[in-house]
Image (tube, helix red, strand yellow):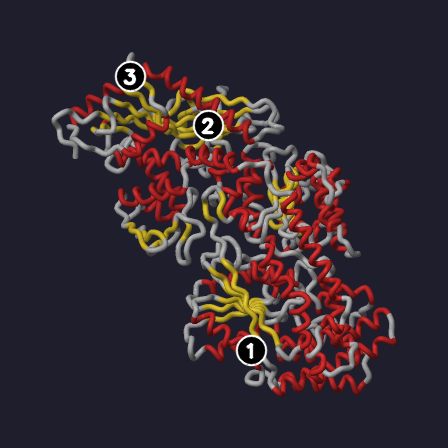
Amino acid sequence: MIKFSPGSIVRCREREWVVLPSVDEELLLLRSLGGSEDEVTGIYLPLNAEIVEPASFPPPDLRQSGDATAARLLWQAARLNLRSGAGPFRSLGHLQVRPRPYQIVPLLMALRLDPVRLLIADDVGVGKTIEAGLIARELLDRGEIRRVAVICPPYLCEQWQQELASKFNLQAVVIRSGTVAQLERGIPLGNTSIFEYYPHFVASVDFIKSERYRASFLLHCPDLVIVDEAHTCAQPAAKQAAQQQRHELLRELASHPGRHLILLTATPHSGVEESFQSLLALLKPQFASFNLQALSEKNRAELARHLVQRRRADVKKWLGEDTPFPERDSLEEVYDLSPDYMSLFKDVYSFAGEIVRSGETLSGWRQRLRYWTALALLRCVMSSPAAAEAALLERVRHLEEKDALGEEDEDLFTRYVYDPAAEEVAIDVAPARVVDEGEAVLPENERRRLRSFARRAAALKGDKDNKVARLAEIIDRLLSEGYHPIVYCRYIATSDYVVEELKRRLGPKWPDLQVISVTGELAEEERQERVRELAAQKQRVLVATDCLSEGINLQEHFNAVVHYDLPWNPNRLEQREGRVDRFGQTAARVKTVLLYGRDNPVDGAVLEVLIRKAVQIRRTLGISVPVPVDSETVMEAVLKSLFLHTRPVQEIQQLTIFDLAPELPQVHRAWDQAVERERESRTRFAQHAIHPEEVLQELQETDAVLGDQRAVESFIVAACERLGAPIRREKGGWLLDPSPLPLSIRERLGASGLLRLSFDSPAPEGFVFVGRNHPLTGALAEYLFNSALDPAGDGQIIARSGVIRTTLVPRRTTLLLLRLRYLLEASNQAAPLLAEEVVVAGWRGRPGQLERLEQEEALRLLEHSRPEANVSTEERMRILQETAGWLEELSSLLQDLAQERALKLHQAHRRVRRITREGRLVVRPQLPPDILGIYVLMPVPKGVAAR
């Protein structure tokens, strides 16, 4: 049985193919000469060996010669058809996104570590997902890993799955409680674990830390693990069982010495240095013993090899490329309660204080239950009449009211009334269960007061609710200014109520306005679908609970945030605003609005103690710094200081919260110290290992092989014009009518009507970003390349040969368009890797007197030559036939060129992967190179006027 080397040409089923690497010697993998790696055919050799035979790349048909544009189109189509490009990076040809230059830095850092152990702590919205996905794709394409796992909170699972597929061409399954049964049914009979069967997966961290799945996950864990929101897996400062279990899982994961591990978080410190150091210890155990406040230069440099931490300001203009992050305008807006609402608030506030004070004689669970009852009741009344009514009337009929609750349910109750920092899923239902449990221990007269509160709350909906009226004014102003706002509420009942009120109040002025509510009542897929439907509306307002403060990127369709209910955790504030204030936001400015009650002492306390301090820190430092103390502890001190004072509401409003709770200034001092530590840390661990000129060199070499965005733009415009599809510039990009394009291209696009194309990322609203792997680019490149190889072609659109008279050359110059293939072989790889590039090689003169051109010069001639004098058909054929006759004499020169390019590729690979498990890397060119095109440039004869 004949063995065919990867990269060689064979003939099978009456056409030529390129042989691809295969780990099975009996399975021959073939790709058509002009096809992509997505269209691979397998031949089982024991049964079909006789139908495969060696072949060579077909030479150009000189009768199908064309003009200079036809030559350039072939060069561009061949280059943009490459996926496994022969550049320093193996992965960039497979990406659906073009990384920003600064996003290459973590990749270069990773390629200098073995194993890869990296903490990427870039600011919110900088692009940590792209940076981690880029490393994963590169290691896969280098053959260093075979499988990838992403561990993240459950609300991020679908987003990670989509990002891996849409940007990195990695198909991963989601593993969590709601998907595991279906995934297990998809496994063939046997004892295979889901963690072993599926090559790439995204798993909920709380699912895999459970006793049932933990051991199986650790046993079958992939080569590379990416951990998102890694700060929720740090060693907790306080006793938090769930976070402790996550940390123990990661510690066991990291104990495998050869496992690659990438940790992602925008808040690595979380205000506690010990927690930060526990994350560093996952990268290298000795980091646990480092004194971070007194690091030696050696230790600092070692730590900096594993840590990259940058603010937006650090990357906004890097290597001369602007990354457009929006400016954030933060406003505060106030409202005054209506007389009836103020009366209810005072009574509820007094009632809450009474039951808290009366609970002081109790202890343990019963004391805390009274406190939570008061807190839940007050927070719902502050949110909306609908939330108050829901908490007081619905009770627990949907929550298994007969279940006995006790001290073990403390965490559940805490999540109902606070905004815990580490909680992955915000509980947005009204805390009816808390109120109901609290009511059960109250005397009858206090229960009657609760029921009266419910009736009074129901009567306040609509015109007696100044808070929602003030919101309508704010939304009206934002819409008039061209904004598309998101309104964040604490509870489902409030979100649904706000939607109805905004429709009623704004409908007459904005008849086309679409307002929807997205809450935790909806499944993840349904939330995303509702957001997509709303995004298609020109006038839109999204009202949501904190189920949308994480997990769905909203920056493409929304550019303002209104906090209808103040979060009691400043981290939640940043999470909400970070949905729109991030890379990909096309608006130059985003607006955020804090809405609070002027006569509400709780709102005032939250603003004074937490929110304004967090906003001021972000403005000063350029990043957010978490509260170094548990925000629940802070809020408990705030609220108890309010409840335990017997002063009426009016008197409390005249005092500052620091007068009422003298321990709170200490919280601010600790926060200031955390800010200073963060400032010092970013200076101490600033990224110096990778220099900008190193990134520039690798990007330039990669672009030379694969083409940059300007090459994509030039190709698509020229190709559409050649194929008769109208394309014209307009503000923001290009407008294309694809209807005249061939059917095979239109089918790949899957869209009808005019297309608005942008070649800049992020694309303006209403435009689609088109990169080298966009369906339009791929379809055009494949169609044109295959057209050039078609024996029935005529060279009018795209051509493999041509003769051009131009003043750019002083004497006859021959340009050969070559496709070179290389095998990259390493001792630890089951099969070699295949790399390709398209090269323009040029010579002046004739055989025996040839002067080789530098590649840059040959490429310049191909790009810029224009016909400046006529060439007759007879003369063109004579020149081309003469040149084709020289190819045999040029073969040794072409082999020398291939060897030179192979050496350069070897050097590039070794340069970016300085520490490697690849073993001894060998790069071998596959000879002879494919001759895609023959083009001859002739000088304009003397006496002939150039056109």
Asked which secondary structure carries label 1, the reply is: helix
Q: Distance between the residues labelled 2 and 3?
A: 28 Å
Q: What element carries label 3?
A: loop
- Give the residue at the far top of this rendering: 848
- Which x, y percent locates residue 463? 55, 85
Depth check: give the residue in front, 497 or 127: 127
Which mark is nearer the camera, 3 or 1? 1
Residue 635 in the image: above or below residue 289: below
Question: In the image, which disc is placed on residue 886?
Answer: 3
Tell which circle, 2 or 1, labels the residue nearer the N-terminal end: 2
Q: Is residue 683 above or below residue 89?
A: below
Q: How dense is the environment of label 2, judged by Cα within 10 Å: few (below 14), some, or many (20 and up)? A: many
Residue for badge 2:
19
Which residue carries the number 1 mark? 468
**Type of amino acid under label 1:** Val
- Please determine whether, in this image, residue 583 is positioned above or below residue 116: below
Q: Which amino acid does label 3 sit on?
A: Trp
Q: Is residue 282 above or below residue 502?
A: above
Q: Residue at x 61, y 63 (%)?
A: 573
Question: Which-is-in-front pick, marks 2 and 1?
Answer: 1
